[in-house]
Amino acid sequence: MNNKLGISNKDWINLSAYIDGALSEIERARLDKSLAESKDLQQELANLQRLKAAVRALPAKKAPRDFMLNPAMVKVRKQQTKLFASLRLASVAATILFLVAFAGEALLKGQIFQNLQTAAPAMEAALSMEPDQAAEQPQIITWGYSPEAKGLGGGGGVGGAPMAGSAEPMMPIEESPIELEVEIPQDQPSLMAEPQEEELELASPGTGEALILGLRPETEGQVIEAEKDVPREQERGLNITTLRWVQGGLAAIALITGLIALILHFRRKRQIQTK
Amino acid sequence: MDEKALIDMALEGDMNAFNHLVLAYQDMAFNTAYRIMSDGPAAEDATQEAFISMYQKLHTYHGGSFKAWLLRIVTNACYDELRRRKRRPTVALEPETDEGDFIESPSWLEDDAPKPDEALNNSELEKALQHCIQALDEKYRAVVVLVDVAGEDYESVAAIIHSPIGTVKSRLARARQKLQHCLQGFWELLPANFRLLDVEGK
């Protein structure tokens, strides 16, 4: 920006600071040199000095009255300020806690998701298994377990589609039109036959009994119950519900205290305005 | 009693000590507020608010220039008051004729008291300057008032307006440039010793 004398903005700023004695030694020496060479700068300097003198010469206005305070004036204000500050603090704290609770929930959900992700490769591996490969590996079927695979390579749950390499869908024995006979060829080494002489068991799936491969002889006749994750799931669900309640409560506190603080603030402003 | 002792006593809840401080600074505070706001009642309100704030914030004063600290509060109070007045502008009491036309200089507003030439000149100069200061943006106005009216240095003003010294420098230069342009219109009103030189140096 140049003024009508063609003085640059930088020179103008330096001239203004020059009359206030606010330039460094180097800047001052540089400007002194420029001033000696430029009549425009000299003229502008003179104008600035006159302007400054004129503003400084403005008569000081005396206070039209005393502004002394009395205890009542500050007491009311102090109480209002304290209440306002407390409410504002409560609102801010509740908001922060709400955000923490929100992040906690996201973290909890993330953990569940991570668990599923960890399980996914095992499931994919099981799904991508070729029938020949699957034939070499015994199919482990567990009963009394949730239909989800949970990364155990299962999939043999009731109503679930058979996985590649798994045994054909089984039917309850009473419904089965044929009697299932398992023959293990002697010349073909099979994991089902050896090395542990695994038993085959026929049972009804509806009653928690079914054909179970991979059963050890010492466990024959015993009722094997799969590890149940149901309580853990319930616990997680409970945690999330509790978290939701906490979030709701915090949000309510943040909103209510924030609103009251806002009302107090505007009321105080109005008091000042109508004063 | 010295300023520091008064501040310490006020911090302990001594209202009399605080009021001593108020009495010591009220003219300076009001003058600054008046120059920023160009309005007596508004400056009065801002000054009162500033002293109430000063009482509430006294514990935040940790040494240094007490005047600069108070000026910061006064400047903020002025900004608040200006904002409030912008939201709720007051209607000027303009005299009108029976036909509804404005009267520029009604006889009942004229001051009949005789004035010496010098007083008239100073009064006109003051009006002109105050008019031009009022025409500045708030940010420029505060800087020019704090430096040229309140006599604060750049560092103090930088602390008062929460800006770097470079900003103070450039705002002040810009404010002075605008004031110069504005005062061109009042050329003839200014006393000879305050008249600005034109380009030809007349």
Image (cartoon, rainbow, N blue to C red):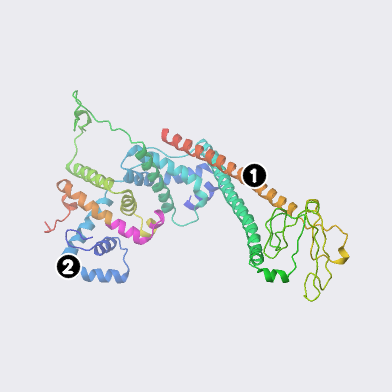
Q: Could you tell me which residue is drawn at 40 percent across and 42 percent down?
A: B47
Q: Is residue B135 left or right of residue B24?
A: left
Question: Where is mark 2, residue-wise?
Answer: A38
Q: Could you tell me which residue is drawn at 54 percent across and 48 percent down?
A: B11
The span shown in magenta is B158-173
**Residue B50 part of the magenta-drawn span:** no
Q: Earlier in the sequence, mark 2 or mark 1?
A: 2
> Which secondary structure, mark 1?
helix
Q: Residues within 10 Å of mark 1 (few under 14, many from 20)?
A: few
Q: Is residue B89 left or right of residue A176?
A: left
Q: In the picture, residue A135 is in which quadrant?
A: bottom right
Q: Amino acid at mark 1?
A: Trp
Which quadrant would the N terminus of chain A be assigned to in this image? bottom left
Q: Amino acid at mark 2?
A: Ser
Question: Where is mark 1, residue-wise?
Answer: A245
Q: Nearer the viewer, residue A15 or B70?
A: A15
Where residue A37 sits in the image (x, y, percent)? 17, 70
Marks 2/1: CA–CA distance: 77 Å
Secondary structure that dominates the magenta span: helix
Where residue A134 sits in the image (x, y, percent)? 70, 69
